[in-house]
Image (cartoon, rainbow, N blue to C red):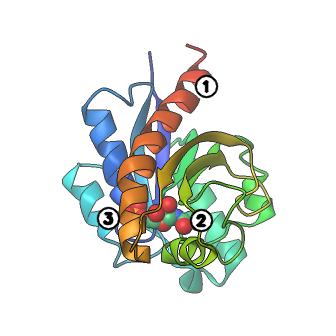
């Protein structure tokens, strides 16, 4: 039976992409296959990870496409070209317009490094999320995998995992713990679950 074709959108290091590739190799992600890695930054190390795994890559730069509309139109044509069924945002550090997200209802998945609805929405991304969690003094944080809709970090929650904040944590230390214990664990599982549902298994 054919697999659900996944496009992973990245901007940076791509450790979450790495977790998805590993899950594919280890038979955890079985109902879907990563068919494309798309970056909005040429320097993203995630592109090297994809190439090492033999996955096709594409780079689309907003400024080179004359703005958001051109950027998203180019993305859409690539998604058609690669016959993509679902999109996974794995550290994709740019917001997609409502026009784009509404074209793929429950077909775009995002991983966010907090327990939504805490520390999320516009302006909360990457290290900033952990800095805010430490500043607020929370004792528990974590990660969330959710569907993407027109509200930043506002779509239906698929999976969450809690992670303890420890005495003396820096934002960097906390970020690493949240990635290792939560993001890299629940993202592959959530993607597998969504792919399985799409196939009706
Ligand atoms: C991850 O922590 C991811 O949750 C976060 O950026 C990091 C990307 O790391 N995403 C967001 O903050 C989105 N709002 P990676 O490139 O190593 O996967």
- What whole-number distance in Å separates the C-alpha atoms at marks 3 and 2? 34 Å
Q: 58 or 193: which is nearer to us?
A: 193
Asked whether 143 or 25 is in front, the reply is 143
Label 1 CB, ligand 1: below 8 Å?
no
Question: Seen in the image, is 170 located left or right of residue 120?
Answer: left
- Circle 1: element type: helix
Q: Residues within 10 Å of mark 2 (few under 14, many from 20)?
A: few
Task: Tell me the number on the disc at residue 42.
Answer: none
Q: Earlier in the sequence, mark 3 or mark 2?
A: 3
Name the residue carrying label 3: 47
Asked if residue 98 lies left or right of residue 173, the reply is right
Q: Is residue 105 above or below residue 117?
A: above
Most distant residue in the front direction: 167
The circle on residue 198 is 1
- Quarter of the image for residue 174 reads bottom left
Q: Residues within 10 Å of mark 3 (few under 14, many from 20)?
A: many
Q: Position of residue 17 (x, y in %)?
A: 37, 53
The residue tagged 2 is 138
Mark closer to the chain start, 1 or 3: 3
Residue 191, percent from left and from top: 50, 37
Quadrant placement of the C terminus: top right
Q: Quadrant of residue 129?
A: bottom right
Compared with 201, 134 (above or below) is below
Q: Residue at x 42, y 64 (%)?
A: 166
Nearest to viewer (mark 3 / mark 2): 2
Q: Quadrant of residue 70?
A: bottom right
Q: Residue at x 47, y 41 (%)?
A: 186
Q: Position of residue 150 (x, y in %)?
A: 79, 59
Image location (x, y in percent) of residue 20? 37, 44
């Amino acid at each position: 039976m054919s697999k659900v074709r996944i496009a992973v959108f990245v901007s940076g290091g791509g450790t979450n992409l790495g977790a998805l590739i590993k899950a594919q190799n280890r038979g955890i992600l079985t109902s879907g296959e990563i068919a494309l890695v798309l970056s909005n930054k040429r320097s993203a190390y995630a592109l090297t990870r994809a190439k090492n795994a033999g996955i096709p890559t594409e780079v689309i730069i907003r400024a080179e496409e004359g703005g958001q509309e051109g950027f998203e139109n180019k993305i859409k044509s690539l998604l058609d070209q690669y016959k993509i069924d679902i999109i996974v945002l794995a550290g994709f550090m740019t917001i997609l317009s409502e026009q784009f997200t509404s074209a793929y209802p429950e077909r775009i998945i995002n991983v966010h490094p907090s327990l939504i609805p805490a520390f999320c929405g516009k302006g909360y991304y990457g290290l900033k999320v952990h800095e805010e969690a430490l500043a607020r003094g929370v004792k528990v944080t974590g990660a969330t995998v959710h569907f993407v809709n027109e509200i930043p970090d506002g779509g239906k929650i698929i999976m969450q995992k809690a992670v303890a904040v420890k005495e003396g944590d820096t934002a960097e230390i906390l970020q690493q713990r949240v990635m290792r214990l939560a993001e890299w664990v629940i993202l592959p599982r959530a993607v597998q679950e969504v792919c399985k549902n799409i196939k009706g298994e």
